Image: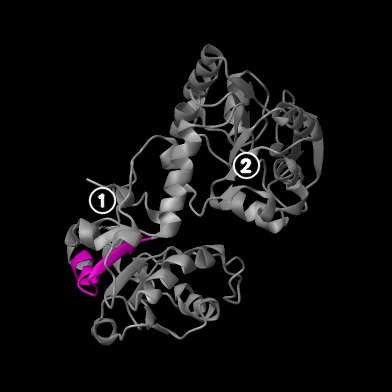
């Protein structure tokens, strides 16, 4: 799959619309706690500025559901962009209101403006044709550099592409890097290739697991999703999170792994607690014997040792989803220890998914990971073998 290249476009003195992914985490005071997604877009923006372009940036933040919600304003993003680009970034008061349209029309070359949160417009998530058309009318060229939302058929990602021919649209540097990296990872991994798959639910990772099994040599399961597999094995999982409607699917995955000769690892011990709370009483129990009213919230020390042993000879590691409730310090140890081991590994290491990326940044091992993807859902859908709606329109014909 070859994408339309940004460097092939004749951008000189033109107006460019760049869809970015500035959906960054913030604290209760509106301070950005991780600006990686903003920094990742700088190369594409600077390339356009070097071509003497006027640059219109667009992104969503959070889920305001078509309403104007002050806490989801992109004002903090505009301020951070100004620092990174070392130039003024004008924030439009709306998305496609008269004021925003006028600003875009009058934007001089070398200047940068940022539209207000795209999801303040209900039509964004509905892939509304009218909104797509208005956004497209702002510029002569369209660049998608928002890998994190390219699996969504939204107006600024999918609908807008209909209004630009192949000579006037392309993938940004970040999007191209992500797509190429995952394509190479899936098609030509250095073996042994292991997948560490965690997170709360099997349902969110089901297709990815099915798609990964023929490609990997080992699978390590953690997080809440492990209990669906453990229950299917007949274990007592107490009050742990479980998806009863997927027990059969869990069995199929385990059977398929056996058939393909893929080593399938499940937790052997669990950190269980009386309740889902940071101050809950907790203890280490075997995976077979979680007390009736207790719930498993992290993998135990024996599982950490087992997973380390299993990962020792691996040359490629793909990790999507934490091993436990890492947001609570008491139940973050399993995820943290696996993260340190992965970071210290000589293997090619790839982290996909917002929670896993957040985890490795929290414990300061992000710089030791070969590649941290900016998209969780998007990277999963690539692993499932799907063509992303936002990418489909940017594939060379």
Magenta highlight range: 132-144
- Check disc 1: other Cα within 10 Å, few if <14, some if 14-19, many if 20+: many
Which residue corresponds to mark 1?
393
Which residue corresponds to mark 2?
349
Quarter of the image for residue 93 reads bottom left
**For numbered disc 2, what is the local secondary structure?**
strand
Q: Residue 208: x, y in percent?
A: 46, 34
Question: What residue is drawn where x is 41% and y is 65%?
Answer: 20
Question: What residue is drawn where x is 55% and y is 80%?
Answer: 83
Q: Residue 115: x, y in percent?
A: 36, 76
The answer to whether 264 appears left or right of 287 in the picture is left
Q: CA distance from mark 2 to mark 1?
A: 30 Å
**For numbered disc 1, what is the local secondary structure?**
loop
Instruction: Say which quadrant the N terminus sits in.
Output: top left
The answer to whether 395 appears left or right of 308 in the picture is left
Choose the circle earlier in sequence order: 2 or 1: 2
62 drawn magenta: no
Where 80 sits versus 397, above or below? below
Q: How many marks?
A: 2
Quarter of the image for residue 34 reads bottom right
Q: Residue 359: x, y in percent?
A: 66, 52
Viewer-closest of 286 and 280: 286
Q: Residue 158: x, y in percent?
A: 27, 55
143 drawn magenta: yes
* Outermost residue to the top: 259
Where 108 sits versus 241, above or below? below
């Amino acid at each position: 799959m070859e994408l339309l290249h940004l460097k092939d476009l004749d951008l000189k003195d033109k107006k460019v619309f760049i869809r970015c992914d500035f959906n960054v985490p913030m604290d209760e005071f509106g301070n950005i706690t991780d600006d990686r997604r903003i920094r990742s877009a700088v190369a594409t923006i600077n390339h356009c500025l070097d071509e003497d372009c006027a640059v219109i940036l667009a992104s969503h933040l959070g889920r305001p559901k078509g309403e104007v919600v002050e806490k989801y304003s992109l004002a903090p993003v505009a301020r951070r962009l100004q620092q990174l680009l070392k130039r003024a970034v004008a924030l439009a008061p709306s998305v496609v209101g008269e004021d925003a349209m006028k600003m875009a029309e009058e934007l001089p070359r070398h200047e940068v403006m940022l539209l207000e949160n795209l999801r303040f417009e209900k039509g964004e998530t509905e892939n509304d044709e009218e909104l797509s058309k208005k956004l497209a009318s702002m510029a002569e060229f369209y660049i998608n550099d928002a890998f994190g939302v390219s699996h969504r058929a939204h107006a600024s990602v999918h609908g807008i592409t209909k209004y630009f021919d192949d000579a006037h649209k392309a993938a940004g540097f970040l999007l191209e890097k992500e797509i190429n990296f995952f394509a190479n990872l899936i098609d030509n991994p250095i073996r042994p290739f292991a997948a560490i798959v965690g997170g709360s639910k099997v349902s969110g990772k089901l297709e990815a697991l099915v798609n990964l099994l023929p490609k990997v040599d080992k699978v390590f399961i953690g997080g809440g999703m492990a209990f669906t597999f453990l229950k299917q094995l007949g274990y007592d999982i107490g009050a742990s999170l479980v998806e009863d409607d997927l027990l059969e699917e869990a069995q199929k995955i385990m059977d398929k792994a056996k058939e393909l000769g893929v080593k399938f690892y499940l937790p052997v011990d669990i950190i269980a607690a009386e309740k889902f709370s940071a101050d809950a009483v907790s203890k280490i129990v075997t995976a077979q014997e979680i007390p009736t009213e207790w719930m498993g919230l992290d993998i135990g020390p024996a599982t950490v040792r087992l997973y380390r042993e299993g990962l020792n000879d691996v040359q490629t590691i793909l990790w999507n989803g934490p091993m436990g409730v890492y947001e609570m310090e008491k139940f973050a140890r399993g995820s943290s220890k696996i993260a340190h081991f992965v970071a210290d590994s000589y293997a090619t290491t790839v982290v996909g998914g917002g929670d896993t990326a957040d985890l490795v940044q929290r414990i300061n091992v992000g710089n030791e990971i070969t590649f941290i993807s900016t998209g969780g859902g998007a990277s999963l859908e690539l692993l499932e073998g799907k063509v992303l709606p936002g990418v489909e329109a940017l594939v060379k014909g």
